[in-house]
Amino acid sequence: MRVGGLAVAIAIAAAACRAPDGSREAGAAGSRTLPPFPQRPGDNAAASATSAAGTGPRIVILGDSLTAGLGLPVGQSYPALLQQRLMNEGLNYHIVNAGVSGDTSAGGLARLDWALEGDVRVMIVALGGNDALRGLPAEQLKENLAAIITRAQARGITVILAGMEAPPNYGRDYFVAFHQVYPALAKEYHVALVPFLLEGVAGLEGMNQADGIHPSATGARIVADNVWKVLKPVVKTSR
């Protein structure tokens, strides 16, 4: 098992405990029952803009603010960068950015039917950071992600799972249990795995915006690299 450094864990914890306006949620450090994160008009501009244009079979990325591209121009979010790579490869797929700031795995499950509208061929599930902040049981995370995967697979959709790590707030047992959710699901449901979405980005100077939380334009390119390594062979073989 790969255990990231303290800087990585702290960066993930901070990312999860920020509201979309950049403020810290009151009581976040010790609460397991936080209310939903507030939303502002335009928080999910990347999602709406990416979904509004383009044709062809869809690749849906179900995620949180990291996917929505909070703090970046739409064209610099990692889903937009993946769209460009698909085009460069001559692959006629349309990326749908279904990232919602502050979303948990339960939130992703609740809006799954909407996200899977249309001709969806591939779904990338990039959820879990906010579950970790709230100290939600790892088993609950696993159940929610499993439900997302099975419902997508029942529609004949290929699923890619993007891993996330927990902060150290709740101790090593929780950290390990959380980490193990993603490879266990990938093995059980035979889905491709991005081991850690923020590999090479979290906690590293220059890879994040001024808040030290969300990837910078440079960091987003690395996140796109992490996902592309797994996505490219999937779309190449599924044509």
Image (tube, rainbow, N blue to C red):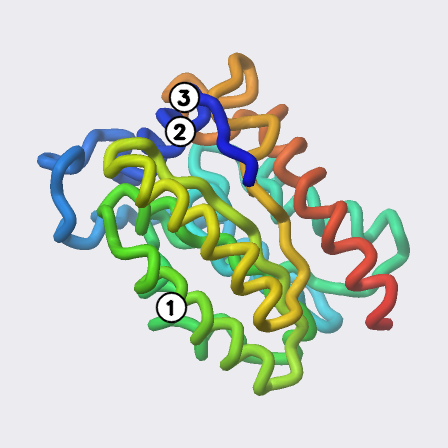
Amino acid type at mark 1? Asn
Out of 117 and 53, give the one closest to the viewer. 117
Distance between the alpha carbons at the discs numbered 1 and 3: 27 Å
Query: Residue 38 in the image: x percent, y percent?
Result: 21, 48
Q: Residue 178, can we see it?
A: yes
Image quarter hosting the N terminus: top right
Displayed quadrant of residue 233:
bottom right
Query: Residue 157 in the image: x percent, y percent?
Result: 64, 77
Structural crowding at the residue carrying mark 3, measured as other residues with C-alpha within 10 Å and reported as few (<14), some (14–19) or many (≥20): few
- For label 1, the SS is helix
Query: Residue 110 in the image: x percent, y percent?
Result: 34, 72
Badge number at residue 6: 3
Badge number at residue 9: 2
Q: Residue furthest top?
A: 205
Amino acid type at mark 3? Leu
Query: Residue 176 in the image: x percent, y percent?
Result: 40, 43
Badge number at residue 234: none
- For label 2, the SS is helix
Distance between the alpha carbons at the discs numbered 2 and 1: 23 Å
Q: Which residue is mark 1?
A: 144
Q: Residue at x 46, y 56 (%)?
A: 181
Q: Are marks 3 and 2 in contact (CB under 8 Å)?
A: yes
Q: Residue at x 73, y 47 (%)?
A: 228
Q: Residue at x 55, y 36 (%)?
A: 2
Tell me if 135 is positioned left or right of 27 in this view. right
